[in-house]
Image: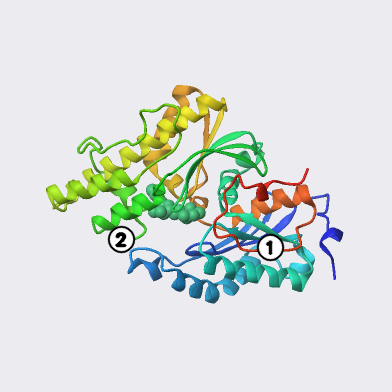
Amino acid sequence: MKRPTENPAPSRRAPRVLAIESSCDETACAIVEGLEVRSSVIATQIEVHADFGGIVPELASRHHLSAVIPVIESALKDAGISSIAAEIDAIAVTRGPGLVGALLVGVQVGRGLAAATGLPLLGIHHMEGHLFSAFIGDSERQSRPFAPHLALLVSGGHSELVDVRGLGDYRILGATRDDAVGEAFDKVAKMVGLGYPGGPVIDRLATEGDATAITFPRAMLRDRKNLEFSFSGLKTAVMVHLEEHGQPNSRAELADLCASFQAAVVDVLVTKTRRARARIGRDRVHVVGGVSANRGLRAAIEAAGLEDSFSVAVPPLRYCGDNAAMIAAAGAARFAVLKSAPPEVSVLASIALDDPAMELPL
Ligand code: KG4
Ligand code: ZN
């Protein structure tokens, strides 16, 4: 049996990594070679949770359990790999943050695969995976250096501005004090009966509406030094608007509400990103996480880049939401540096991107 230290990546090619992602409501497996995606399979549970208007943790764990093996088999088949032990260099798995029961499924299967094959097992931070999502998909993306850049990380559980100084070297410049951006989209969608998840449907309707129809608050913009976010006041403002005016009674009214809400979110995100960039002096801004699929946000950050002279990168749409290709890419980058893996990977339900545990050994 191969031991981790005896398994350096062959020098002829980038590390080939199989990754499993199960932190939330997607069971995913992917195989990459460095930043080159060989296969990426995602089984989504959206329909399972839609009736409840949000994720039910116990249901998520159960569905991960039934989906994980078929998803791995299909990723192996798509990549044309018949032997994990012979053709893969390392296993990577999302260790956190996320739902404990859901994470445990991926981590346990990862442990099992590593034990059975003798391959090293790397525990990856879910948000580090999202950082890598802007580097996969085409050769132009793959050719960019990973650091330095400023990242706006916006997902269902996180909203952060991160100074990416190197692999494992992250400084959080500002984070949300309450709701994450995706969470705000989901809650507002629920209020107007648009179902779960709310982001994509609000995004779609917003393209039909008038963003100036309703003036919603832009929280925490006055203090220019403050790079934190708050979205619960905006959510309350939507609720108060609905109490005063009732539910929208036409598609046009609904579209106006969606466009006005989205404009308030985008305005705050882009304004804070511009301030953060000016402060730390980076010339590259990346927007990643599920909300990076948002058309309004993409257009506004592109426009800000042209005005302030910084370049902008967003992931291809298929890698914006949770997927295992981004986890595998982060795993390959770590493995290329470490050439081995720590002996034990445990689940960490909440771990910050700038936690010392994220740092690579020098
Ligand atoms: O990164 P992600 O797939 O999962 C987490 O790590 O949380 O992000 C999911 C979030 C959900 O809240 C969803 O509503 C939001 O991303 N989202 C969007 C869009 N697509 C997904 N929000 C705004 N506009 C979108 N197009
Ligand atoms: Zn995510």
Whether residues under marks 1 and 2 lie with C-beta atoms below 8 angstroms apart, the answer is no
> What amino acid is found at the position of numbered circle 2 in the picture?
Gly
In this figure, what is the number of numbered marks?
Answer: 2
Q: Locate residue 73 relative to residue 262 in the image: left or right.
A: right
In-front residue for pair 309/234: 234
Q: Locate residue 284 relative to residue 209 in the image: left or right.
A: right
Residue at 79%, 56% in the rendered image: 340
In-front residue for pair 128/222: 222
Q: Position of residue 117 (x, y in %)?
A: 77, 70
Nearest to the eye among marks 1 and 2: give it: 1
Residue at 41%, 68% in the rendered image: 56
Say which residue label 2 marks: 195
Q: Secondary structure at mark 1?
A: loop
Say which residue label 1 marks: 345
Q: How many residues crowd around disc 1 within 10 Å: few (fewer than 14), some, or many (20 or more)?
A: some
Q: Position of residue 137 (x, y in %)?
A: 58, 48
Q: Locate residue 54 relative to residue 350 in the image: left or right.
A: left
Q: Position of residue 82 (x, y in %)?
A: 72, 70
26 w.r.t. 254: above or below: below
Q: Secondary structure at mark 2?
A: loop
Q: Locate residue 13 relative to residue 222 in the image: left or right.
A: right
154 w.r.t. 163: above or below: below
In-front residue for pair 146/264: 264
